[in-house]
Amino acid sequence: MFTRTFQKIVLVTLFTLSASAFAEDFNKFYIQGIIGSSIKEISESNLLAGVDAVGKLGGVDTSASKATFGLKLGYRLSETLRFDLSYYDLSYGKTTWGTDFCNCQEYNPNNATPFSAHLSSDTVFASAYYSVNSSVLPKGLSPYFGIGLGSSRNKFKDGTGNYGIGDNDLLGNKTKNSFAYKFDLGVEYAISKNFGIDAAVTFMDIGKFSSANYRDYAGFVETIAPYTFTSDLAPIYNLGISYKF
């Protein structure tokens, strides 16, 4: 008697789970293209940089930074929980800064020798998102928050060298792998079962940038203390178009 009752319970449970699975009215996989604002916040390192008389960095300018592009491939586990792998193409553009070789411990822009480099990054994340569904909101509208962990390849490519000496003074280029993380606050809108729009602000930290530990000074290679920078937890305002399948 007990065995038959248990079998019935198991069969009813399996039927209920199967029915609910088939009743899910959403596509589980999605791909999303992203375009976003430029990333700007970056800080000079506290380390001294240069050759012989090393100097203090300061006056960092990232006004030439470029738009952000990204791509996501995701899986929706339920209407509230989803995961994705994402790639971001980030660029600070031509970044300029000064180095004060006169006073190693402080930065004085009046004494600073200007430098420049192109700072860019290829960054990947594995992310999880939780959506808030409410009957109060318009149909198809879902606010969400998310968190992502990943890795960045941060590229330091010499710009025009040391303005004070001339374009022949070139810093060594370097690509540095770094830990990256992000937080997302956004809202999804389902246009249809297959298409959606995603508007979000992503706070992203992509780690450190560094020049190589040498420069080419008029054809002679010299060892230097590298020029290093640290990205801050910077906001990127982005818009995404999703295809669900």
Image: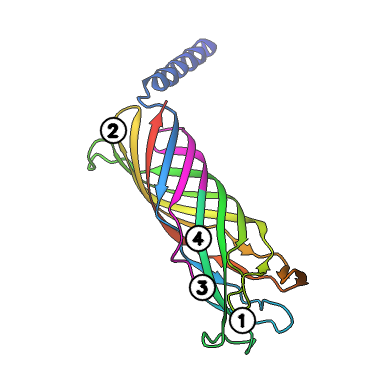
Q: What residue is at 44 percent from the left and 21 percent from the top?
A: 17
Mark 1: which secondary structure?
Answer: strand
Residue 242, placed above or below residue 175: above
Q: What residue type is labelled 2?
A: Ile
- The alpha-carbon separation of the residues under discs 3 and 4 comes to 11 Å
Which region shows up in magenta? 61-88
* Residue at mark 2: 191
Q: How crowded is mark 3: few (under 14 residues within 10 Å), some or many (20 or more)?
A: some
Q: Which mark is residue 92?
A: 4
Q: What residue type is labelled 3?
A: Val
* Residue at mark 1: 56
**Magenta span includes 83:** yes
Mark 4: which secondary structure?
Answer: strand
The answer to whether marks 3 and 4 mark residues whose Cβ atoms lie closer than 8 Å is: no
Which of marks 4 and 3 precedes in the sequence? 3
Quadrant position of the C terminus in the picture: top left
Q: What residue type is labelled 4?
A: Tyr
Q: Residue 60 carries which label?
A: 3
Camera-near label (3 vs 2) is 3
Q: Main secondary structure of the magenta part?
A: strand
> Can the viewer see residue 79?
no
Camera-near label (2 vs 1) is 1
Q: In the rendered image, which quarter is residue 224 located in?
A: bottom right
Q: What residue is at 48 percent from the left and 39 percent from the top?
A: 72
- The alpha-carbon separation of the residues under discs 1 and 3 comes to 12 Å
Residue 2, placed above or below residue 243: above
